[in-house]
Image (cartoon, rainbow, N blue to C red):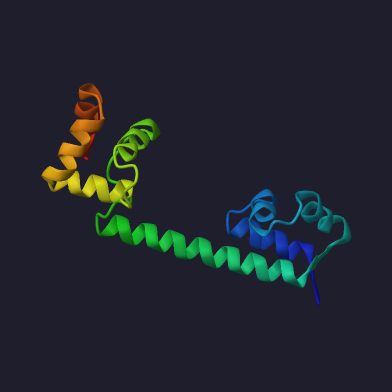
Amino acid sequence: MEVKNTIFELLLTKSNFKKKDFAEYSKIPYDTVVGWKKKDKVPAYAMVILKDMIYRKKVDDDLIENLNRNHISINNYNLTKYEEKRLSSAFWGTNLTIDEIIKQIKEKNQKILKKVEENLPKDLIKQILGKINYA
């Protein structure tokens, strides 16, 4: 069963998506997606993919809204990529993630703080700790 292109484009625009977004999400070449307009037909599988795309966007939006409502931040620190990399390199060989390291620093875990002190320059430590403590 094939669907009219106008329905496909209407659903895209109502969901605030562009054809390029759909092409990236579905891994269908952009030229193919654009070509459906000339034929005025869209394959049924494209509508299934679009439905999934719309559903996932709604779930993501609901999750973000829920986190914001409960004042939960995904990354409640603003370290640069360089600072994160340097901090995680101080714990090379351990299974600690950057989030776990930061949590331990916030809890003032002496073992973690000592490792940071031993492996990072003082100015970088001051910079990172300042950002973590005021996050």
Q: Is residue 65 visible?
A: yes
Q: Is residue 4 above or below residue 134?
A: below
Please give left or right for residue 61 compared with residue 19 in the image: left
Residue at position x 59%, y 68% from top? 52
Q: Is residue 129 visible?
A: no
- Residue 41 lies left or right of residue 28; in this view the side is right
| Picture quarter with the C terminus | top left
Quarter holding the N terminus is: bottom right
**Front one among 117 and 57:** 117
Name the residue rendered at 36%, 33% in the picture: 80
Where in the figure is residue 122, as x and y percent of width and height? 20, 24
Furthest residue in direction top, as rendered: 123
| Residue located at (51% from left, 61% from top) | 57
Which of the 4 image quarters holds residue 71? bottom left
Where residue 54 appears, as percent x and y from the top left, is: 57, 64
Count of numbered labels shown in the rendering = 0
Q: Furthest-right residue in view?
A: 39
Q: Based on the displayed image, in which of its 4 quarters is residue 133 positioned?
A: top left
Nearest the camera: 127 or 117? 117
Residue furthest out toward the bottom: 1
| Left or right, 19 with reference to 39 | left
Q: Nearer the viewer, residue 21 or 130?
A: 130
131 relative to 5, above or below: above
In front here: 27 or 61?
Answer: 27
- Residue drawn at the location 28% of the way across and 41% of the way down: 77
84 in relation to 124, above or below: below
**Where residue 101 sits in the image (x, y, percent)?**
25, 46
